[in-house]
Amino acid sequence: MDANQEKLVAAARSCIGRPYKYGAKPEDMPNYFDCSSFTQYVFKTIGIDIPRSTLLQATIGKEIPLDQPPAVGDLIFFRGSKGHYDDALFPGKSVYIGHVALYIGENKIIHGAFQRGVVEEIPMETAIKEKGPIVLIKKVLSG
């Protein structure tokens, strides 16, 4: 891992156990998170501003093919149970997104988890069982 990846993972792990709050706003952070406010917050700790919503976060960065493994710091987007979609943001694609998580390596993610009401670190397989398939991977960190 490079220095930015290490800082990102450390910031993400420092949030584990913090309560989940759907629609958490910047003034709620770092006390409460939903999935996209969590990813926004941890990127901000290393000086990278990303959009607030899951859907808008899916529009930034470089798309990684789903048949390639993600790298530490990549954003993993799941279908989710409350998907969002906007044709104008994804021309020519059918992308139905309901959840975002941060990939931390070793086939694990950290995310704001509605199911358990906290930020947690879990295996990707568990997230896929709970959230549905991965529909998009985005690299935000350069390198």
Image (cartoon, rainbow, N blue to C red):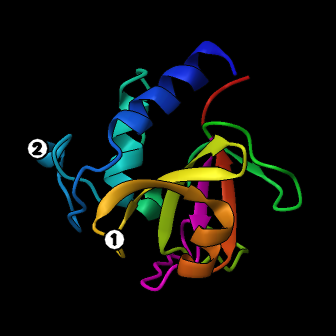
Q: Nearer the viewer, residue 141 or 127?
A: 127
Nearest to the eye among marks 1 and 2: give it.
1
Residue 62 image point, x, y percent: 70, 43
Tell me what residue is drawn at x 42 percent, y 46 percent. Answer: 39
Question: Is 35 situated left or right of 60 in this image?
Answer: left
The residue identified by callout 1 is: 116
Tell me what residue is drawn at x 25 percent, y 50 percent. Answer: 18
The crowd level at tag 1 (other Cα within 10 Å; few <14, some 14-19, many 20+) is few
* Quarter of the image where one finds residue 47: top left
The residue identified by callout 2 is: 27
* Quarter of the image where one finds residue 20: bottom left
In magenta, the rendered stretch is: 74-89
Question: Is 130 situated left or right of 139 in this image?
Answer: left
- Whether 94 is drawn above or below 106: the answer is below
Quarter placement of the C terminus? top right
Give the residue type that dot 2 points to.
Glu
